Image (cartoon, grey):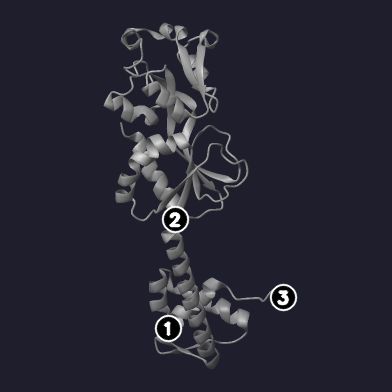
Amino acid sequence: MIRDLPSLNALRTFEAAARLESATRAAAELNVTHGAVSRQIRVLEAELGTTLFTHEGRGLALTAAGRRLRDVASSALDQLRDGCARLRHDIETAPFVLGCSGSVLARWMIPRLERMGRELPGVKLNLSVIEHAPANGMPGLDAMLLLAEPPWPAAWQVHVLAPERIAPVFSPRHPRSAALRKANLAALVKEPLLHTTSRPQAWPAWARAQRVAVARLQFGQAFEHLYYMLEAAVAGLGVAIAPEPLVADDIAAGRLLAPWAFRATRASWVLCAPKSSGDPRIATLGHWLQQQLALP
């Protein structure tokens, strides 16, 4: 059986007026007008069919019915406030489970975890490896950090963080490193290119952006994951194609070279969460990730 309750807003307004014994002070506490308080009290009295206040001078005096309702409303609202506070505390202190690919985890997230701990002390992060985004729902995850392109599933809230930019990279240990540093793009058609089975579109997307005929590309060793392909490139085993943030540290340290331009693809770095989630840490983490991806 569904029990009819008066308006929660009316009850909250009544409780403030009863506790403060003044519609004016209640209006100030609730940040509304005196008239709004009076209207809510009249609505509540009409719903209950009884008078809750009488006027005494400039103040309010509770009737017997008003005193009974004050005690019940005060207790109920206190329980609601305590329950909401505990819920917020549990949410804020529970680990935030973020899913991302093993490549993003190893080459980008892990090197930044110490900084994140300093700058986001309120986000206790647990990282979970996912190589393929689930089609429906996000079981066991609060959010996912993805390199992906629209359309997005209707059940997701999507925070776009940065465009994806990719380019060929190779190691100074590559046998033809000296020649490749000075070569134009045409030299790539003679190279057996390292690639991944997880993102076969990467090389063709970059080639089309550079007006290089995709059909002329020669593909060499394939790897299941981007991380392994980039490790092979660092070892001098060939030319790889990579998102800029995942190789920026290696380029800065001289472990990898990128003599050709990074080009934007149709994909983006995105933070995705269930649309129904109201966890405030999603926006906090998204803003921090966006800042990190913008750093050189």
User: Badge 3: how crowded within 10 Å, few (<14), some, or many (20+)?
Assistant: few
Q: In the picture, which quadrant includes the C terminus?
A: top left
Say whether disc 1 or disc 3 marks the residue closer to the N-terminus.
Answer: 3
Q: Which amino acid does label 1 sit on?
A: Arg
> Extreme right residue here?
1
Residue 246 visible in the snapshot: yes
User: Disc 3 marks which residue?
Assistant: 1
Q: Nearer the viewer, residue 235 or 126?
A: 235
User: CA–CA distance between discs 3 and 2?
Assistant: 38 Å
User: Disc 2 marks which residue?
Assistant: 95
Q: What residue type is labelled 2?
A: Pro
> Is residue 86 rendered to the left or right of residue 132?
left
User: Disc 1 marks which residue?
Assistant: 19
Q: In the picture, which quadrant includes the N terminus?
A: bottom right
Q: Nearer the viewer, residue 191 or 258?
A: 191
Q: Which amino acid does label 3 sit on?
A: Met
Q: Which of 138 and 276 is in front in this view?
A: 138
209 w.r.t. 151: above or below = above
Of helix, strand and loop, which one carries label 3? loop
Residue occupying the point 45% across, 28% down: 228
